[in-house]
Image: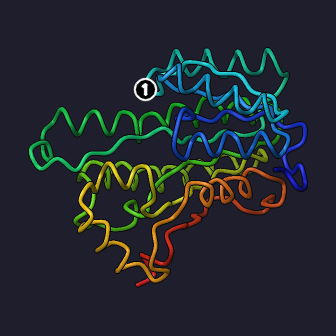
Amino acid sequence: MALNRRLEGKVAIVTGASNGMGAAEAKLLASEGARVVACDIQSAPGEEVVSEILAEGGEAEYVHCDVTSEKEWESVVEGTVSRYGALHVLVNNAGISSTSVEDNLSTESWEDIMNINATGVFLGTKTTAEVMKEQGSGSIVNISSIMGFVGGEYGHPAYHASKGAVRIFSKAMAVKYGPYGVRVNTVHPGFMPPMTSSNHPTSGSRARYVEQTPLRRTGEVIEVAYGVLFLASDEASFVTGTELVIDGGYIAQ
């Protein structure tokens, strides 16, 4: 339930919005007054997220978007601006991972992960930033990971590389577009369901992570969504080119 309507009148695109963190972000931004364009390649769950937003009195629509396609990005951004007259927020949330030992160093696996996690963020950021530049303001929030800072036993090597690329790319874009009033920041979640459950299916691996986390628990997707909300809002008007780590203290050690 919204308390302050912190995004009243703003238009936001959220990718990977059909489930998990993306769904939580889309719902929270809508509850805070944003008109949300929920993007994904999974239409049925994406439409369900939009239905839930509408049922709560929010405003949203589902739009199919393969984030690896520049043409689809251009279509989504152009359609959003045409319908709403502006674009204030982009949340590049879509991403994939893998922990399969068999494909850890396969070229195909590397390309799949990098295309979605890194190239998808690049395409969304550059397409959206140009629109925001013309209007003189905007906030882009790119979802990276704590694995964009460090290596480790968790995650595919390409996942670490892709999330590190998102972190540094976002800094470069923050410098490039800052003079035009466009802010670009990254959010770095730690382990949390549902992704934690799929990537680390054994209770033993999850227990080891919890034991290594100072707060002694996994996170919740809503905790990431609140971080995204802050960076998207005018409360973060002097925040750009930085990282917001939401990991229970995992990489503080």
Residue 25, above or below 116: below
Q: Residue at x 33, y 72 (%)?
A: 209
Residue 120 percent coordinates (x, y) = 46, 33
Direction left: furthest residue: 102
Mark 1: which amino acid?
Thr
Q: How is the image coloured?
A: rainbow
Q: Residue at x 70, y 41 (%)?
A: 27
Q: Quadrant of residue 185?
A: bottom right
Residue 104 percent coordinates (x, y) = 15, 47
Q: Report helix, strand or loop for mark 1.
A: loop
Q: Residue at x 35, y 80 (%)?
A: 211
Residue 218, above or below 17: below
Q: Residue 103 vs residue 23: left or right?
A: left
Q: Residue 185 vs residue 233: left or right?
A: left
Of residues 24 and 155, which is closer to you in this image? 24
Residue 80 percent coordinates (x, y) = 73, 21
> Which quadrant is the C terminus positioned in?
bottom left
The residue indicated by pointer 1 is 68
Q: Quadrant of residue 131?
A: top right
Of residues 167 and 253, which is closer to you in this image? 253
Q: Residues within 10 Å of mark 1 (few under 14, many from 20)?
A: many
Q: Residue at x 68, y 31 (%)?
A: 130
Q: Residue 196 vs residue 248: left or right?
A: left
* Number of on-image labels: 1
Residue 153 percent coordinates (x, y) = 22, 65
